[in-house]
Amino acid sequence: MSSSNSELSYNSFSQKQRLLITIGCLGLVFSTTAYGLSLATIQGPMLKNIGAESAFSLVTIIGSLAMCIMTPIGGRLCDIYRMRKVVVFGGLLAMIAGLLFPFANNLPMMIGCRFLLFLAEGSFISAPYILARIINKPQDVPKAMGLLSAMIALGSFLGSYLAGVFTDLHMMWLAIVFPIIGLLIGVPLIWLHYPKQEKEVDMHLDKIGILLLSLSLCGILLALNFGPSAGWSHPIVLSCFLIGIVALIILIKYETKTESPLIPIQMFKNRQYALLLFIAALSVFYLTGMTTYVPKAVQDLMGQSTTVSGSLTIPRTIISVILPSFVGLWIAKNQTKHTWMALAIAGISIGISFSFLVFIGPNMPVWFVISMLALTGIADSFRSVCITPAAQTLLAPKDMGIGTSLIGFVISLSSAFSSAINGIAYDTLRLATPGLKGMTEGIDTVFLIAALTGLLAFLLSAFVYRKMAYARMKKLASQK
């Protein structure tokens, strides 16, 4: 007998099923993070091979845009067609795109493969976190999040490090395809051990919402990307802005009235939930700077090899693998108090790290860069473990699935805007001052933006979210 995602719980699975599904989730997480970091590490050499180095920021934003658009769509697809089908079909599509990538010998094909890969991954990127809630007891969810966070760290490290090693060994094709291992493990395990479910007949895919979301994001982000090079008064740039802004206004109005919205606008009326999402967005804004521009700075400004740039995150990985489990146990002791503290620690760690990386250059030692990136491992360990459980405590049971997916959507949206804004800063300064000086100024500005977003996340967590959390705790206590 089939059942809906909301009807499945810890008791719906045997111990063997829970173990194998958990391994499957870890495989999916490894693949998505390893692909992101491996492509970021080798993107420069790949573009250089085809003579398209000037398209660096464009290629970066294409992947972020695809992931951002597909994340809420993937959440709704899971509600309609069920988790199992979305993971299987999305995983197969990601495998196909990953296998085609090594044959991308021109810019349009490279952009197409990157867009298809990140589009496919976006369909199931929230699945491991929804599954963690379904197959675990409530008190064990923070531990499960810690395990997923550890795999994110491991996938990130192996993605960047192995991509650098394979590139230096002139095995670019292997540097591109090796993250497919996670999909080869995760997709079959979830297909075999997660219950088969019938399509939800009372829900439908919000096609108009998808169209409006796509127009909005593509218009605004592409305008931001091309503005510095084409000129802000260029007709195409102005047209993109106009289309994006108009589509966004229509999207907000439409989603408030439709019966099955792609993005439930009413959930943002919960101010604490909305603030938590905003802090989450600020806390991951730095990732584009770390994954894309730190390797570029180390290779082009410091003159290091791709192997060195790929090994920068070794201490960060060690911290991110070990620390989340302890953070999960710590948060479980007092979720209200320790959540805002975890968010504040994450924000201040990012702020300190990139405040020093602003001064990166030929004279900065590699060990110092490694140390600063290690601080971001502390930030990720605290942020990734506390965000999802904290958000789920603010959601009604009927909104749990889409509310969890919105976390992934906001993170993807932050990544997309980060790519666009960083691209503006980098391209504007690089084009204004040709040569190494312009590149240095562009990269320094990207790191300054990352530092400021981290500090803002700290201030909001310590002085605004903290008050909201304690007020809610007192309100719930008075109702008992």
Image (spheres, rainbow, N blue to C red):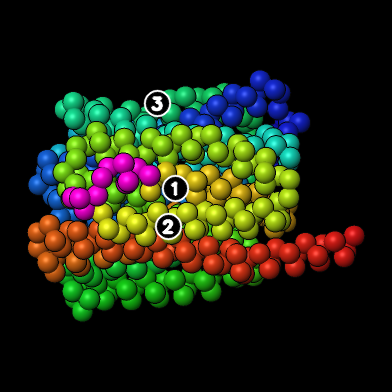
Horizontal relation, residue 289 to residue 199: left or right: left
Assess whether residue 212 is covered by the magenta stretch: no
Whether the magenta-drawn stretch holds residue 365 is answered as yes
Look at discs 3 and 2 and give the one toward the viewer: 2
| First in residue order: circle 1 vs circle 3 | 3
Residue located at (42% from left, 57% from top): 352
259 left or right of 357 in image: right
Q: Which mark is residue 42?
A: none
Other residues around mark 3 within 10 Å, as few (<14) / some (14–19) / many (≥20): some
- Mark whose residue sits in front, 1 or 3: 1
Q: Please provide the residue range marked out in magenta.
A: 361-371
- Disc 1 on helix, strand or loop? helix
Instruction: Locate the N terminus and report the quarter of the image it occupies.
Output: top right
**Amino acid type at image mark 3:** Ile
Which sits in the foreground, 370 or 434? Answer: 370
Q: Are marks 1 and 2 in contact (CB under 8 Å)?
A: yes
Write down the residue under mark 2: 352
Q: Nearer the viewer, residue 21 or 210?
A: 21
At 68% from the left and 68% from the top, the residue drawn is 467
* Residue for badge 1: 375
**Residue 392: horizontal and vertical position, in percent?**
67, 52
The answer to which of marks 3 and 2 sits earlier in the sequence is 3
Residue bearing mark 3 = 181
SS at badge 3: helix
Q: Is residue 389 visible?
A: yes
Q: Secondary structure at mark 2?
A: helix
Quadrant location of the C terminus in the rendered image = bottom right
Which residue is painted at 17% across and 58% down in the image?
439
